């Protein structure tokens, strides 16, 4: 599920697992060859403390299942994020 799909930039050969939620209100960029596990949440806007900012997942990164990416996060190229992480 994607909120604000007009602010989502999606590269080629991206694999996003089932039940992943993306809030792209302030921009989400997912570059080429990224893998995102199931049940992840990617937030460019956090309504709990009203933080906001772009989330960027660079080329070849892998995000483990059940992970949460918060506003103003950059995952560098080819980095692996362990399952159940909060970044």
Image: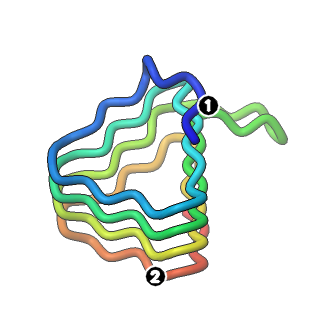
In the depicted structure, whether residue 68 falls above or below residue 4: below
In the depicted structure, whether residue 85 falls above or below residue 75: below
Q: Secondary structure at mark 2?
A: loop
Q: CA distance from mark 2 to mark 1?
A: 24 Å
Are the residues flagged by discs 2 and 1 in contact, CB closer than 8 Å?
no
Residue occupying image coordinates x 26% and y 65%: 61
- Give the left or right position of residue 63, taking residue 20 as reference: left
Q: Residues within 10 Å of mark 2 (few under 14, many from 20)?
A: few
Residue 45 at x, y = what percent?
65, 33
Q: Which residue is mark 2?
A: 82
Residue 17 at x, y = what percent?
45, 63
Residue 52 at x, y = what percent?
61, 31
Which quadrant holds the C terminus?
bottom right
Q: Secondary structure at mark 1?
A: strand
Residue sitting nearer the eye, 53 or 62: 62
Name the quadrant containing residue 77.
Answer: bottom left
């Amino acid at each position: 599920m994607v909120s604000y799909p007009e602010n989502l930039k999606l590269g080629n050969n991206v694999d996003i697992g089932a039940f992943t939620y993306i809030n792209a209100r302030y921009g989400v960029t997912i570059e080429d060859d990224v893998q995102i596990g199931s049940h992840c949440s990617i937030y460019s806007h956090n309504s709990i403390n009203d933080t906001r900012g772009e989330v960027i997942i660079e080329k070849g990164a892998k995000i483990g299942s059940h992970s949460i990416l918060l506003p103003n996060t950059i995952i560098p190229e080819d980095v692996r994020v362990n399952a159940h992480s909060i970044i």
